[in-house]
C-alpha cells in the first residue's frame, strides 16, 4: 500500500513538471526569455487543526520568464521525515509540497525586483493514518529578488496555502498553511529580470556567443550595429538609440529614474519622479530657486528670494517682501514697507507708516510706540514761552519778548518824546549794560551777556542790517570824545562778529558828544548821553525802509531798546524792538 502511495505521488510531481515545461516551451517559442534555477530553505507553519509542529525544510524551483513582467515557475518543498504521536501510536511523516505558479514582476530597480505569484499546490503528508491523505490547494505569495550580480540573486518569499476542502480527518473542512523561504537563484540565458546588458553577439538560439567563437558562422547575425549600442541590428528593437545610452537585451534604452533621458546620457540619474528635466536629465529650474520645475509650486520666484521645499518664498516678518531680498527682515507687523522690505516713515518720527497712528507728527517731537506725541510736560528752561526743543536762543533773560524761535525781538517801532532843544534828533537804539574800561574802548566782561543776546537775535533775523553808534557827554576835548566813541562802537561790532553776526550787516560809527538825549548840565543827564545805540538800516540785504508804523521826528525814526526796570539784561519785545540797557562811558 505504501509503495502504491509513493508511486502515485511521484507520478503527480512528474506530471506537474511536464505541464510547466510544456507551457514554458510554448511561450519560449513565441518570446526569447530566461530561466531561473534556485534552491532555498523553508519554514512551514501548519494549520492548527492538523496538530503538527512548525517545521524547517528546503526545496528547489525552476522558473521561466517570457517577458519583462510575466513568467512561470515550478517548485518542490521537502521536509525531513519525523515522527509524531497520535492516539498513543507513533506515525512517521514525509511532508512534501509541490506547486506551479504564474509570476508577475511588479517593481524593478537597479538591484532589486519585487514580485507576486499565485497558483496550484499539492500537499502530501505521509503513508499512515491519520496523515494518509493528499490535499489540493491554491496559494499566493509575494517576495523580492536582490541581485548580487547580473546572474545571481538572493530571493525572499512569504506564501499562504489554502485548502478549501481538506481530506484530513481532523474535523476541519478548510485549512491554511504558511511558508517562508529564503535562497539563491541563478539566471540563465537572455537578460535577467533587472535587464542587464546581454552578450553582444547572439545567434538567436539562446546560446551566448562571441565574435571569436562565431565570427561569420551560419546563424550568427552580421556585425552591423547602426546605432552603436552593442546590440546587432538583427536583434535591435530600438535601432535609433542615441549615442552613449545604456540599453537592455533588445537594444532599447534603459531609464532608471524614468525622467525620459536614457541611462548613460542622464547626468542626474537619481532625479525624483515627476521632476521636469532638461536634455541632460537634470532637473530644470526656471526661476533658479533650487527647487526643480514640476515640483516648484511657485515657479516665478524673484531672484535671490529664500524658498521652502515647495519652491515658494518665505517671509518671516510677513511684510510681503521675501526673505533673502528683504533688507529689513524684522519689520513690525502691519508696517508699510518699500521694495527692499524696509519700513516707510513719512513724518520721520521713528515709527513706521502703517503702525504710526499719528502720521503727521511735527519734526523733533518725541513720540510713543504708536507714533503719537508723548504726553509729558514740555520743558521751557528760560521761561520765554518757546519749548526747549524749538528754542534757538535757550538762555533768554527773564521778561524778554521773543519771536517764534525763542530769540529776542530787537526792533519795535514806538513813539518817543521830542528831543531836547538844540539836540540833533536821530534814531535811538540804546544798549544799556554795555560797559567799557574807563577812558578806553575795551569791553568789560559784564557786557558779554547782553551782547550775546543781541548777537542771537541778529542771527535769528538775518535780514536785518544795523548801524552801531557810539556817544559821549560833553566833558573833555571834542576830538578825543569823537575818537573814543568811534573806538567803542567798533569794539561792539567786533564782538558781535565774533559771535557769528556777518560783519557786512554792521556799520560802526562814533558821534562824540553830538546827538545828546539829555542835558549835560547834570550828572544824570551826562550819564544818559554816554551810550551805544543800534539803528536798523535799509540795505541790499533786506531792502527794508522805515517800518510803516514808525513815527518820524524831524525826518528821523526813533527805535528804542526797552529794558525792564532794575535789569541789566535785555528783554524780549514785539517784532521790531531793540534791547535797552545802561551804558558807562
Image (cartoon, rainbow, N blue to C red):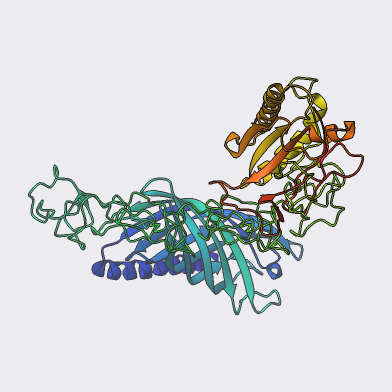
Q: Position of residue 288 (x, y in %)?
A: 42, 54
- The one nearer the camera, 519 or 259, is 519
* Residue 68 position (above or below residue 306): below
- The one nearer the camera, 309 or 321, is 321
Q: For the point 42% across and 61% down, which residue is it? A: 293
Q: In this view, which residue lies farthest toward the front? A: 422
Q: Quadrant of the N terminus?
A: bottom right
Q: Quadrant of the C terminus?
A: top right
Say left or right for 368 vs 564.
left
Q: Position of residue 489 (x, y in %)?
A: 69, 30
- The one nearer the camera, 105 or 311, is 311
* Residue 137 position (above or below residue 217): below
Tell me how many marks there are: 0
Say left or right for 323 vs 60.
right
Q: In this view, which residue lies farthest toward the right? A: 566
Q: Position of residue 129 (x, y in %)?
A: 65, 69
Q: Is residue 262 in sight in this rendering?
A: yes
Q: For the point 26% across and 63% down, which residue is it? A: 32
Say left or right for 447 vs 306.
right
Amino acid at each position: 500500500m505504501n509503495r502504491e502511495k509513493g508511486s502515485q505521488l511521484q507520478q503527480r510531481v512528474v506530471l506537474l513538471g511536464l505541464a510547466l515545461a510544456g507551457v514554458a516551451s510554448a511561450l519560449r517559442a513565441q518570446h526569447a526569455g530566461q530561466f531561473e534555477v534556485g534552491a532555498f530553505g523553508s519554514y512551514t507553519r501548519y494549520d492548527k487543526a492538523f496538530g503538527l509542529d512548525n517545521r524547517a525544510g528546503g526545496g528547489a524551483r525552476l522558473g521561466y520568464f517570457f517577458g519583462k513582467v510575466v513568467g512561470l515557475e515550478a517548485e518542490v518543498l521537502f521536509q525531513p521525515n519525523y515522527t509524531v504521536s497520535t492516539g498513543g501510536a507513533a506515525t512517521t511523516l514525509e511532508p512534501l509540497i509541490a506547486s506551479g505558479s504564474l509570476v508577475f514582476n511588479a517593481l524593478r530597480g537597479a538591484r532589486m525586483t519585487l514580485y507576486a505569484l499565485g497558483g496550484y499546490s499539492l500537499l502530501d503528508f505521509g503513508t499512515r493514518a491519520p496523515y494518509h491523505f493528499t490535499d489540493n490547494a491554491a496559494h499566493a505569495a509575494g517576495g523580492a529578488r536582490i541581485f548580487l550580480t547580473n546572474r545571481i540573486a538572493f530571493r525572499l518569499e512569504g506564501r499562504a496555502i489554502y485548502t478549501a476542502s481538506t481530506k484530513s480527518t481532523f474535523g476541519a473542512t478548510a485549512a491554511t498553511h504558511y511558508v517562508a523561504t529564503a535562497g539563491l537563484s541563478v539566471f540563465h540565458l537572455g537578460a535577467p529580470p533587472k535587464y542587464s546588458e546581454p552578450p553582444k553577439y547572439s545567434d538567436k538560439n539562446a546560446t551566448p556567443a562571441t565574435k571569436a567563437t562565431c565570427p561569420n558562422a551560419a546563424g550568427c547575425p552580421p556585425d552591423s550595429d547602426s546605432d552603436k549600442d552593442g546590440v546587432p541590428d538583427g536583434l535591435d528593437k530600438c535601432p535609433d538609440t542615441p549615442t552613449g545610452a545604456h540599453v537592455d537585451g533588445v537594444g532599447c534604452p534603459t531609464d532608471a529614474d524614468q525622467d525620459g533621458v536614457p541611462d548613460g546620457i542622464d547626468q542626474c540619474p537619481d532625479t525624483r519622479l515627476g521632476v521636469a528635466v532638461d536634455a541632460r536629465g537634470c532637473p530644470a529650474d526656471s526661476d533658479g530657486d533650487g527647487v526643480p520645475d514640476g515640483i516648484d509650486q511657485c515657479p516665478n520666484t524673484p531672484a535671490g528670494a529664500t524658498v521652502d521645499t515647495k519652491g515658494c518664498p518665505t517671509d518671516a516678518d510677513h511684510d510681503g517682501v521675501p526673505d533673502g531680498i528683504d533688507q529689513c527682515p524684522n519689520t513690525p507687523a502691519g508696517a508699510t514697507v518699500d521694495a527692499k522690505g524696509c519700513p516707510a516713515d513719512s513724518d520721520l518720527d521713528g515709527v513706521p507708516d502703517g503702525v504710526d497712528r499719528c502720521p503727521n507728527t511735527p519734526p523733533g517731537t518725541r513720540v510713543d510706540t504708536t507714533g503719537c506725541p508723548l504726553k509729558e510736560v514740555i520743558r521751557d528752561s528760560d521761561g520765554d514761552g518757546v519749548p526747549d526743543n524749538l528754542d534757538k536762543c535757550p538762555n533768554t533773560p527773564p521778561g524778554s519778548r521773543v519771536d517764534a524761535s525763542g530769540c529776542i525781538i530787537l526792533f519795535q517801532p514806538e513813539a518817543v518824546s521830542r528831543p531836547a532843544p538844540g539836540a540833533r534828533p536821530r534814531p535811538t537804539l540804546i544798549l544799556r549794560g554795555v560797559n567799557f574800561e574807563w577812558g578806553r574802548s575795551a569791553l568789560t566782561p559784564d557786557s558779554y551777556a547782553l551782547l550775546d543776546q543781541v548777537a542771537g537775535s541778529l542771527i535769528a533775523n538775518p535780514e536785518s542790517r544795523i548801524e552801531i553808534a557810539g556817544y559821549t557827554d560833553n566833558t573833555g576835548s571834542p576830538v578825543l570824545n569823537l575818537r573814543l566813541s568811534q573806538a567803542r562802537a567798533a569794539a561792539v561790532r567786533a564782538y558781535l562778529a565774533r559771535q557769528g553776526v556777518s560783519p557786512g550787516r554792521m556799520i560802526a560809527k562814533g558821534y562824540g558828544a553830538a546827538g545828546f538825549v539829555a542835558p549835560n548840565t547834570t550828572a544824570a543827564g551826562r550819564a544818559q548821553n554816554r551810550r551805544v545805540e543800534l539803528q536798523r538800516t535799509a540795505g541790499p540785504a533786506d531792502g527794508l525802509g522805515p517800518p510803516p508804523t514808525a513815527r518820524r521826528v524831524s525826518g528821523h525814526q526813533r527805535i528804542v531798546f526797552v529794558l525792564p526796570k532794575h535789569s541789566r539784561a535785555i528783554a524780549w519785545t514785539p517784532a521790531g524792538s531793540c534791547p535797552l540797557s545802561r551804558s558807562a562811558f
